[in-house]
């Protein structure tokens, strides 16, 4: 029987088992059985994990209409939490503090929307000129390819007309989704108020879910998520505001038309790392080129972008964002791609805050620490100029 168990191995091994003593047969048979059982258990565990990941992704996709406003509301509630706590410490009722926080958020969003809308209206005044310039550029490109390569495009494939332009299609799509946008916005505001008001109740619920011996650890995780997320989101808001100021001053000095609009655009796109700031600067250069900007002006726009990125990377991020949450570039791009695949544009904007919070959880859960290490910033010696170190030390002293 023992040799029969071992015969599933290679043929020389089965012959060896048949001529050995019986005690060796039994020991070797047990080893084979344990090994096979372990391999089956490992395969079953890996399959369960894979199915869990597939199930989570499916839930995220099919529950998009519910989860997107909830997640955005949770992020905004985290952003408003310090102000809400300050109002409560000043003696204000919890409900009134939540409503006041929401009121300030609405004023801020309305102000940004009004400013952007005003700039867009200014931009649309030049729409006819932009359309003419784009049409002329496309015709020149068609002529160049026909002259040099003998390639001609099908009629109307590149020529812009009023009925088939992508702008008109985008406007129709925007009009079709306006009701959904309003619904999402109202739901988001409702979630902000109730998450701020019921935050202690939700905290107690999460603590009750954890085993008694893990409650202290769970409370520590929740505290760190709230604190570091607040620092990250508040720091990001401050950095975007400073980028608006720097881009606005830089573009105005260069003489970029609609400088304020492009400054706001470049600052807001900073929410999407790597891709956002490059996209904003590229759009600024393209629009300036269409409006007849000279080559030196376009080079000046690129130089302004480089200088601001240097200030952002060496001064703003270390001083304002701090070292609390750092994601390495590979997993930053992976998070952005997954966010776009799962939730589209809202997923792109939510990807970085969500993965930052996930890293905080990983750093405080023993079994997930390797995952936190994997997605975290790659440690290395980064030399920085002496004046940057002096500025950072002066800033920290003033802060203390």
Image: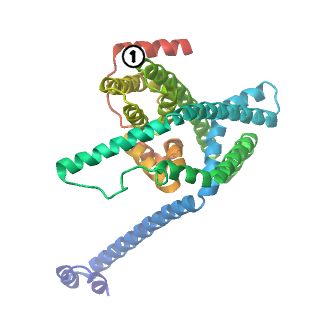
Rendering coords of residue 20 (x, y %): 21, 81
Q: Which residue lies at the image location 60% right of the left edge and 31% below the top edge?
A: 118
Residue under label 1, please give it. Answer: 388
**Are there few (<14), some (14-19), or many (20+) residues within 10 Å of tag 1?**
few
Q: Which residue lies at the image location 44% right of the left edge and 41% below the top edge?
A: 131
* Quadrant occupied by the N terminus: bottom left
Image height of 59 relative to 11, above or below: above
Q: Is residue 179 visible?
A: yes
Rendering coords of residue 365 (x, y %): 52, 46
Answer with left or right where residue 107 lies relative to residue 341: right
Figure coloring: rainbow
Which residue is at the front of the view, 175 or 50?
Answer: 175
Q: Which residue lies at the image location 51% right of the left edge and 22% below the top edge?
A: 245
Which residue is at the front of the view, 192 or 245?
Answer: 245
Rendering coords of residue 350 (x, y %): 54, 45
Rendering coords of residue 43 (x, y %): 40, 69
Which residue is at the front of the view, 319 or 283?
Answer: 283
- Element at label 1: helix
Answer with left or right where residue 108 lies relative to residue 29: right
Image height of 49 relative to 207, above or below: below
Q: Is residue 207 visible?
A: no
């Amino acid at each position: 029987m023992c040799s029969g168990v071992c015969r599933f191995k290679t043929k020389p091994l089965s012959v060896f088992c048949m001529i050995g003593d019986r005690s060796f047969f039994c020991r070797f048979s047990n080893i084979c059985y344990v090994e096979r059982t372990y391999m089956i258990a490992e395969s079953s565990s890996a399959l369960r994990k894979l199915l869990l990941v597939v199930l989570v992704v499916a839930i995220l996709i099919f529950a998009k209409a519910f989860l997107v406003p909830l997640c955005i509301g949770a992020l905004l509630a985290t952003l408003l939490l310090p102000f809400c706590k300050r109002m409560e410490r000043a003696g204000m009722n919890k409900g009134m503090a939540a409503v006041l926080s929401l009121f300030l958020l609405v004023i801020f969003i309305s102000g940004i929307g009004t400013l952007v809308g005003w700039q867009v209206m200014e931009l649309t005044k030049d729409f006819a000129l932009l359309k003419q310039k784009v049409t002329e550029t496309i015709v020149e490109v068609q002529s160049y390819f026909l002259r040099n390569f003998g390639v001609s495009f099908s009629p109307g494939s590149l020529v812009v007309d009023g009925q088939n332009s992508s702008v008109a299609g985008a406007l129709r799509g925007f009009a079709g989704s306006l009701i959904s946008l309003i619904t999402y916005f109202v739901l988001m505001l409702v979630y902000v108020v109730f998450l701020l008001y019921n935050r202690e109740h939700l905290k107690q619920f999460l603590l009750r879910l954890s085993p008694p011996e893990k409650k202290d650890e769970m409370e520590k995780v929740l505290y760190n998520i709230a604190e570091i997320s607040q620092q990250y989101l508040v720091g990001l808001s401050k950095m975007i505001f400073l980028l608006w100021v720097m881009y606005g001053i830089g573009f105005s000095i260069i003489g970029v038309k609609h400088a304020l609009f492009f400054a706001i655009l470049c600052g807001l796109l900073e929410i999407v790392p790597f891709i956002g700031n490059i996209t904003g600067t590229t759009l600024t250069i393209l629009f300036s080129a269409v409006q007849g900007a000279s080559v030196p002006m376009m080079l000046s726009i690129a130089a302004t972008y480089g200088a601001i990125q240097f200030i952002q990377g060496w001064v703003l991020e270390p001083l304002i964002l701090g070292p609390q949450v750092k994601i390495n570039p590979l997993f930053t791009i992976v998070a952005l791609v997954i966010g776009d695949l799962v939730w589209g544009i809202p997923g792109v904007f939510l990807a970085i805050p969500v993965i930052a919070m996930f890293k905080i959880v990983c750093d405080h859960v023993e079994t997930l620490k390797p995952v936190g290490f994997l997605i975290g910033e790659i440690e290395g010696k980064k030399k920085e100029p002496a004046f940057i170190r002096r500025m950072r030390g002066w800033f920290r002293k003033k802060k203390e």
